[in-house]
Image (cartoon, grey):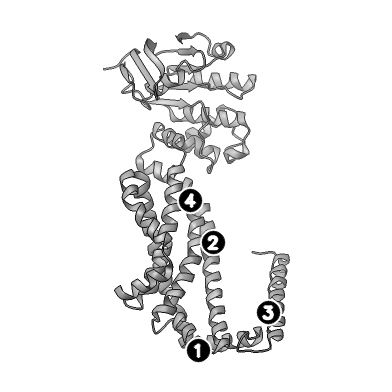
Amino acid sequence: MTYDVISVKNLSKSFGGHIVLKNFSAQIPLCGVTVIRGASGAGKTTLFRLLLGLEKPDAGEIVGMKKRIPAVVFQEDRLLPWTTALDNVAIGSNEARAEAALSRLGLCESTCQLPRELSGGMKRRVAIARALAYGGDILFLDEPFTGLDEENKRIAANALLSANVPILVITHDDAEAELFGEYCEIVID
Amino acid sequence: MPSKRKLLQTALIALTYLAIWEAVSLLVGKELLLPSPLSTLSRLAVLLTKGDSWLYAGLTLLRIMSGYLLGVLAGVLLAVLTARSRFAEALLSPLRAIVKASPVTSFILLALLWLSSDLVPLFISFLMVVPMVWTATAEAIIQTDPRLVEMGKLFGLSRRQVVRKIYIPSVLPQFLAVCTTSLGFAWKSGVAAEIIALPQKSIGFMLYQSKLRIETVDLFAWTLMIVALSMLLEWLLVRSMRRIRHDV
């Protein structure tokens, strides 16, 4: 059975008595770009982690995620410090896909460099390339453009759109959301 | 390959220490208390021409290295077990604390009651290495960034791939460092165990004999052999570790 939406029903999550999400419900379309907004601490990243199955909800349910293969750009780069950009990108795929993804993001000169030899923006692009190379059927992007200049933000957004899979993105920045063209918006208060 | 400059520097340092040794020996003026470097080195050269010396050194090496390698293996297994299970950590950590806190001589004397004198140095080297490798490796496993592990799982890595691609490279620097440190401890405690347990064909036995007969030159020559063997082993270990780090 396939779903055209991810259905989030009455989701609640708290950490050590601190309520992060309370009775949150939403229908997340499985097409195009969906931007998740909310104030700092509103629970955007927690919602991501719940959708990805990295956290268990205290209450509520998520329907439509089980058979999905998510490719993720985390809030942090999460690169393996001991291996090259190419090996980092190829972690869930293969060298050919990794090289193509790095090239797409303008990093074909940096394939053999270790994360410590890359600038903050380059590391971010490696993290984006890793998600692209993985080839999941839905992209989860948590503040994907942090540390990128305008030109690289545009290049990265185009590369992500060219994957042609549903995209869920957390961003605070209207201008960054607009890089994806048309999008749906879900607000967490 | 070390550069010419570095070789020259090492030679100069060695010569300085030999000169100090010679000067102090001349000052003391009694070979019985402090033999000169020349007499020690000549005695070592004589020992090296004897087949028995090589046999004793080889058997000492075999005992200590067997204990060391078994200790590293046991340390890693215990580290994996206790890093994964809180119950195992609670159950086994008192044992680690006891081994760490007890004087090595107590264990040597106890081991003498339980084992043949040939096995005592092996057992003691093993016992010295296990808690060191265990503690450092377990800490490194626990300190592995959980966010990287989470990333690996989300990007479809199997449990075996997570171990190979994330845990092993993360743990490796601390593991290799403790392997080097514990080699020195294994060597020192192993020779100490030989001196007390006195397995017939061993450097420890020869050291004891030298002390018994007040042959200070022999005592120094055998000690020099121990130091040289220990340094050689450490050098070989560091070299192979560099290769391992490069390969992983």
**Residue B33 % position (x, y):** 61, 86
Which label lies toward us, 4 or 3? 3
Q: Earlier in the sequence, mark 1 or mark 4?
A: 1
Residue indicated by mark 2: B238
Q: CA distance from mark 2 to mark 3?
A: 29 Å
Q: Please, is residue B139 above or below residue A143 in the view?
A: below
Q: CA distance from mark 1 to mark 4?
A: 41 Å
To the question of a shared chain for discs 4 and 2, the answer is: yes
To the question of a shared chain for discs 4 and 3, the answer is: yes
Q: CA distance from mark 1 to mark 2?
A: 30 Å
Determine the residue located farthest toward the left in the rendered image: A1
Residue indicated by mark 4: B172
Nearest the viewer among B140 and A108 is B140
Q: Chain of mark 2?
A: B
Q: Amino acid at mark 3?
A: Trp
Q: Secondary structure at mark 4?
A: helix
Residue indicated by mark 3: B21
Q: Chain of mark 4?
A: B
Q: Residue at x 37, y 64 (%)?
A: B70
Q: Please, is residue B189 above or below residue B136 in the view?
A: below
Label 4 close to label 2 by CB (< 8 Å): no
**Residue A152 % position (x, y):** 61, 23
Judge the density around disc 2: few (<14), some (14-19), many (≥20) Cα neighbours within 10 Å: some
Q: Earlier in the sequence, mark 1 or mark 2?
A: 1
Nearest the viewer among A44 and A177 is A44
Q: Chain of mark 3?
A: B
